[in-house]
Amino acid sequence: MNGPSRPRPRATALAFALLATLLSLLVARPAAAGGGTFRLGSTSVSEVSGGWHIYCDVTLPKAPPIPHVTLKFLLTKTAVFERSLVDNNPNPVTNRTSLVNQNPSVESLEVDFADARGQIWKGTHFDFSLTRVRGYESGEYKFQVRTSDGVDIGTPTTLTLKGDNPVVDRRAMNFDAKNPGIKKVDTGEHPNGPAKVDDTAAAAPTNGDVVPAGTAPPFLSEDAFKKQPEEIHEHPKGCGCDVPGRGAAGVSEGTRALAALWTGLGLSVLVWRRRRAPRPDAQG
């Protein structure tokens, strides 16, 4: 009876070769993803005149085609050195406060990879400054370098910025009403009834109030309430009726003219009839 078959030497060598290739790819992957290396001159920098000066060495996988390359320096705040006033201590106390989920601050800078002769190299020495004006403060930062197309250079490192941050008052508030230095605040609630109100103090003008001087004129003058001459109409004496066209005697001029006309017509008719009437001597 034949025993279990052993793997062939050729197949075993091929499996080892594939495993070695896979391990080499896994080991080389971070270096390839990094796309180069960078090193800080010092991971701890002291503040000078409101800023921190950073020195670093940047090395690319190969020399760039242009002498000046735009790189992004990302600084994510991970801790802040808080200076605070606490109880029973007259001097500020510095505490390290950890931070999470902070957005990185990005500094896009042009890095020169050429020397004075114009020859381009893949590595260079570079320095730049971080200031409080741009929002930086004393604390710890995660420091990263990337190319303009998002490729990381090297691995992130921790950068510590030393300095004195503004003091924050963390002392507890004192509510001791017996302390003569503390002024009580009147909330309006009195167990023995409402507090007495000083009317004289309320009536007296305080500094800055406007006090009227004199009496302001009325909005409408007194003449506005008096009737004008054209609005006054006197009725004539008598029955109280006012008939237009009447004279002083109370008879209208039209009536007089009509009476004179009828009187003249009557006289004319009488004269005409007397002339047509036969005379007495003519009939005999």
Image (spheres, rainbow, N blue to C red):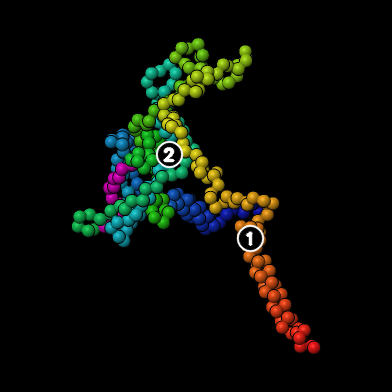
Q: Which residue is mark 1?
A: 246
Image side of residue 281 versus residue 157, left or right = right
- 128 within the magenta span: yes
Image side of residue 64 versus residue 25, left or right = left
Q: Secondary structure at mark 1?
A: loop
Q: Secondary structure at mark 2?
A: strand
The three-letter amino acid code for the residue at tag 1 is Arg
The three-letter amino acid code for the residue at tag 2 is Lys
Quadrant of the image containing the C terminus: bottom right
Residue at the limit of the structure toward the right, as seen here: 284
Image side of residue 113 versus residue 27, left or right = left
Q: CA distance from mark 2 to mark 1?
A: 110 Å
Q: Which residue is mark 2?
A: 77
- The residue lying at 43 percent from left, 44 percent from top is 104
Of residue 200 and residue 66, the one placed in the foreground of this image is 200
**Magenta range:** 120-130
Of residue 165 and residue 26, the one placed in the foreground of this image is 165
Position in image of residue 146 (x %, y %): 39, 51
- 275 within the magenta span: no
Q: Is residue 218 above or below residue 2?
A: above
Image side of residue 129 versus residue 10, left or right = left
Asked whether residue 97 appears in the rendered view, the answer is yes
